[in-house]
Amino acid sequence: MKAPVVMSAYALVMVGGGLVAFTMAPEGANALTALIVPTVAALLMLVCAGASALINRSKPIGMIGIHLGLVLPLVFAFGIGQRAMIATGASGEYRESRASFDAQVEAGEMPTGDEAFIEYLQREKYRAMYEGVDGSPDYVSWLESDDAQDINDYDKGYLAVILWVLTGASLIAFIALLLSRPKPQARGATGNEESGEAPRDSAEEA
C-alpha cells in the first residue's frame, strides 16, 4: 500500500474519531475541542499525503511529505495516548465518586439528583483542598471560584475509549508507513533511473 493511501485512510479515521467524540459528548464537555484536534491532525496528514504523491514530479517535496507523514502519527500517538490515560483516570475517579454518592443516597444521608451530586463533588473537592489548612477560604465564597466549577461531573469513559482507538490507529499508521517505504535496492534503482545512470553490477564494482 502506497504512503499517500495510508495517510489518507489514517486522516479519515482521525476525523471519524473526532465526530464520534463530538456526538457522544455530554452537556458541559469540551465537545468542540474533541472535534477540532483530530480534524487538524487529519488535515496535516492530508497535506503530507498530497506532498508525498508529488515524489515523481518533485523529489524534495515528495520526500518531505513522506518523512513528515511518517513522523506525525508517532507524535499523535504519544499526545493522544497521554490524553487517553488522563481520561481513563478521570473515568475511574468519577465512578468511585458516583458509587460513594449513591451509597449515601441509599443510606438517606444525601438527596438524589444531579444537582445534589454536583454539590457532593464540590464539597469533597473543598475538603480535599483545604481540610486542615490554615487561612483557607470559606466554602460559600469558594463556590464562586473556578476551582469549584472544575469538577469531574460526568463519565469520560467514552472519550477514553475513542482516544485509545485513535492511539492504536496512529501506531498502526506509523507501522504501515514504515513498511511502505521502498527497500534500499529499490531506492537505489529509482535514483539511478532519475539520474539516467544504469545500476552497476556488484561484480563490476569489485
Image (spheres, rainbow, N blue to C red):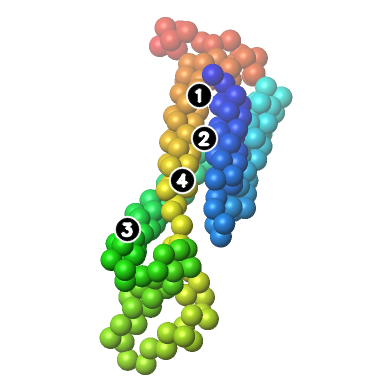
Disc nearest the viewer among 3 and 1: 3
Q: Nearer the viewer, residue 167 or 132?
A: 132
Instruction: Answer with left or right where residue 4 lies relative to residue 163.
Output: right
User: Image height check: is 186 above or below 171?
Assistant: above
Q: CA distance from mark 4 to mark 1?
A: 35 Å
The amino acid sitting under disc 4 is Tyr
* Image quadrant in which the N terminus is located: top right
- Asked which secondary structure carries label 3, the reply is helix
Going by the numbered disc 1, the residue's amino acid type is Arg
Q: What is the total number of numbered labels drawn onto the structure image?
A: 4
Find disc 1 in the rendering and name its residue. Answer: 181
Say which residue label 4 marks.
158
SS type, badge 2: helix
Measure the alpha-carbon separation of dots 3 and 1: 51 Å
Q: Which residue is mark 3?
A: 99
> Mark 3 near mark 1, Cβ–Cβ under 8 Å?
no
- Who's the residue at 53% across and 81% down the image? 144
**Amino acid at circle 2:** Leu
Q: Is residue 81 above or below residue 197?
A: below
Q: Along the polypeptide, which appears first: circle 2 or circle 3?
A: 2
Q: Position of residue 35 (x, y in %)?
A: 60, 47
Q: Which mark sits nearer the N-terminus, 2 or 4?
A: 2
Q: CA distance from mark 2 to mark 4?
A: 28 Å
